[in-house]
Amino acid sequence: MSAIVVFIDQVDAPGKLHAIHHQLLTLARGAGEPVAVVAGPVSAELAAELGAYGVSRVLVSEQAELGGFLVAPKADLVAQAATAVSASAVLVDNGAQGREIAARVGVALDAGVITDAVAVSYDGGALVAHKSVLAGSYTVQARATSAVAVISVKSHSVEASEAAQAGVPAVEALTVAFAPASLGARVTKRTPRAATGRPELEDARIVVAGGRGVDGDFGPVEELADVLGAAVGASRAAADAGWISHAAQVGQTGKKVSPQLYISVGISGAIQQKAGMQTSKLIVAVNKDSDSPIFEIADFGIVGDLFKVLPQAVEEIKRRRA
Amino acid sequence: MTQRTVVENSALNIVVLVKYVPDTQFDRHLTGENHLLDRNESILSEMDEYALEAALALTDARGGAKAGNNVTALTLGPAAAAAAVKKSLQIGATAGLHISDEALAGSDASATSLALAAAIRTLGPVDLVITGMASTDGETSIIPAQLAARLGLPQVTFASSLEVEGSTVTARRDGDDVSEEIQATLPALVSVTDQANEPRYPNFKGILAAKKKKVTTLSLADIGVPAHAVGLAGSKTTVTEAAERPARTAGVIITDSGDAGIQLVDFLAAQKLI
């Protein structure tokens, strides 16, 4: 079986795997021999977790450059590790960093790069990436024609599962030779954001998003999100107004989400917004303007005042649960 | 790339990537056996306006074209893509470069970044390559990172703010968990987000001035790229299937008469979401 590299970043928060890593390892195990390539320390606990997901081989680098510069040194690690194990594929997460690592690994290995995969299947030994394009108006299947395929994969592309038999992986240190330009973009300051305690937008089963109509007050949106265990999103107008962090922005230039339920509140639903949410399974819209384009794509729409409708819904959910 | 010493506030030579993309306001379609994007009804990619603005803000602060600053708008695409360069010249770019060759059709990100790197190398010493955060058609954000790798430039991507002091570029990159300050020495590649600035519009003076600006059109042979390295033949990915997703249709729309919040909960309960 050919080796499939899964990149695991442990530089900032070492210790355990994220859900996306479980998913990538599950995909890799189904298509070949998963090889974990880790930036940062591999603790005994992490090695055991990797073993549980069927990893028998781990390549690790703790070189300081991996944390002190933007993206490029991590891409050097992944490319050199993939060459060392003769990998047929490289899987990374689909965050901004993951996509850029994929892009650079593609150049280093002269390999095809596919981003934003929502599922990965196998066909005659080749990995096939499934993705939505043109703001969700098409679904396509794509594959690499090169010896190595590099794919960045979105959350929930597969249900993660542990291997039938847990193993104890061999952990090998890899000394990465960084390209001079890889050490050109230095991280000179890091300011962590305060955690919201809510689910991540791209992982959440339910998203409640507010727009211009909330008029500076995200309170009702957050209260509904919290009774539903949902993530909070925002339109670009709301984020640009400074009412909420741009990290919450859903749309063409923000996050692209496909939750089970997307509740759009006070958002008109122009293309900028639709590009980020129209692949949601169900869309509910609350807007006081019955002409808003959001109602053209909503499964359930309410023309009304969000400051009345949302609190009433919150009270009703609490009442039914009591 | 050739290193250039940039002294305090000296003139800058900047290349801005501009892409001619189908207008997102209209329905967009994949056509033909290779599932290529129908490029009718195209415009300058909205995201690239932020890149152009970033370049113009830097050069304006250094005295603009009169002081020897250059902003070259570079596009790669069919004959019609010249419109993206023309619009950039109207907005304020000082020169245009259009790489046009039939063999480019169907190029994936890898082939595109290869050709763009070759095109930029023909421009001599460049201080900055500035791009948008993504195109509004492919939306992959692969090109900036691949171009930095191919040109051997520091990669400063997803910048939500950008400053250049002397030969140091400083940018802010806002991630989900952390906001980072990034510094690099020129020459460098920077991609900017839609938070970086407020793009200007072309004015009457700019539209008139653009007619006198130079647009160079080069073929693949001119930039030293063999035809087999790009297009469908040179791409390293292939789209094997494409299906149009059925358009979403409107469902039930009600007007609140006092109990819409309760009806909302009824809907969620019926869908087993609460």
Image (cartoon, coloured by chain):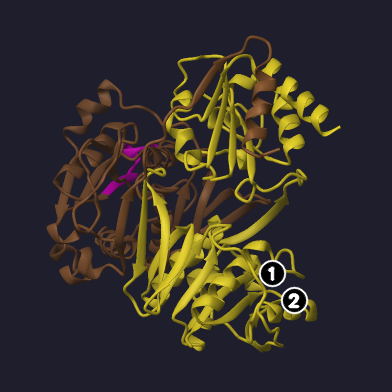
SS assignment at label 1: loop
Chain with brown colouring: B
Confirm whether residue B5 shows in the render: no
Residue shown at 46% from the left, 35% from the top: A274
Three-letter residue code for mark 1: Gln
On screen, residue A30 above or below B137: below
Q: Nearer the viewer, residue A288 or B119?
A: A288
Span shown in magenta: B63-74
* Residue B71 magenta-highlighted: yes
Instruction: Give left or right: position of A145 versus B271.
Output: left
- From the image, tell me which residue sits under label 2: A46
Image vertical order of residue A223 relative to residue B116, above or below:
above
Within the image, what quadrant is residue B239 found in? bottom left
**Marked residue nearer the N-terminal end (2 or 1):** 1
Magenta segment includes A134:
no
B228 versus A265 height, above or below = below
